[in-house]
Amino acid sequence: MRILTIPLALAALAFFAAPIYACDEDCKKANAEQEHGVKFASYLNQDFCRSTRADFLIQDYKSLAKYRADQLPGGHKGGMNNIRKMLDQRVDWLRECDDYLRLTDQGRIFRDRDTTDKIFKAMKGVSEELNNLVYNGSQDVIVTNGLDIAEQDFDQMLQLLDQHRTQMQLRGQLVNL
């Protein structure tokens, strides 16, 4: 009888103890809120952040590349300002997700800290340069010699995004529809 008691006790312990150690998305969110003294928006979860990242790397990348190739060389302030505002909005969304993923111990929005920091820095650089051109440059100055830095910043940002997107596709983590 004693031989049966020990395996039954171990099985019961494993059965009842397993839920105690399992922590799903809601559990991670609640723990992070309590530990870090923050309140996450109700819509934030890993799937939302993956979708936000995928939309940025696929759809927004196409828009940014098209703008860089077709519109930026013309130096029109309206388009520059619109792209700057779009980039600032995407940075806000992606940072919100990055903070959520980081604080809930689910990684970073762009694979790791180094990649995430580089991409955010590049996006900030493009936004700042476009802002300088829109608010500090005359149309003639922008077209003749003001676009060089903006074009270089854009190219660097697009290259970083393309590299990250390609790496994710090779790992099967991003499907380009």
Image (spheres, rainbow, N blue to C red):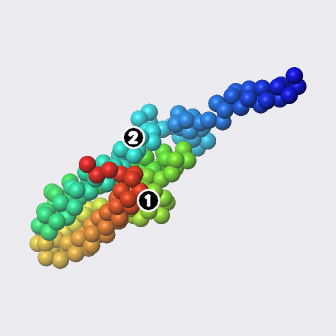
The location of residue 53, given as percent across then percent down, is 36, 50
Residue at 41 percent of width and 65 percent of height: 118
Rendered position, 77 above or below 45: below
Looking at the picture, how far across and down is residue 170, in whole percent? 38, 59
* Alpha carbon distance from label 1 to label 2: 17 Å
The residue drawn where x is 66% and y is 36% is 21
Among the 4 quarters of the image, the one containing residue 51? top left
Label 1 belongs to which residue? 116
In front: 4, or 122?
4
Q: Please say if 42 is above or below 177.
A: above
Rendered residue at 58%/44% (across/down)? 36
Task: Establish if 124 lies above or below 97.
Answer: below
Give neighbour class at mark 2: few <14, some 14-19, many 20+ (Cα, 10 Å): few
- Write down the residue under mark 2: 48
Residue type marked 1: Thr
Task: Identify the residue at horizontal 55%, vertical 35% (top origin).
Answer: 24
Q: Looking at the rendering, in which quadrant would you find the N terminus?
A: top right
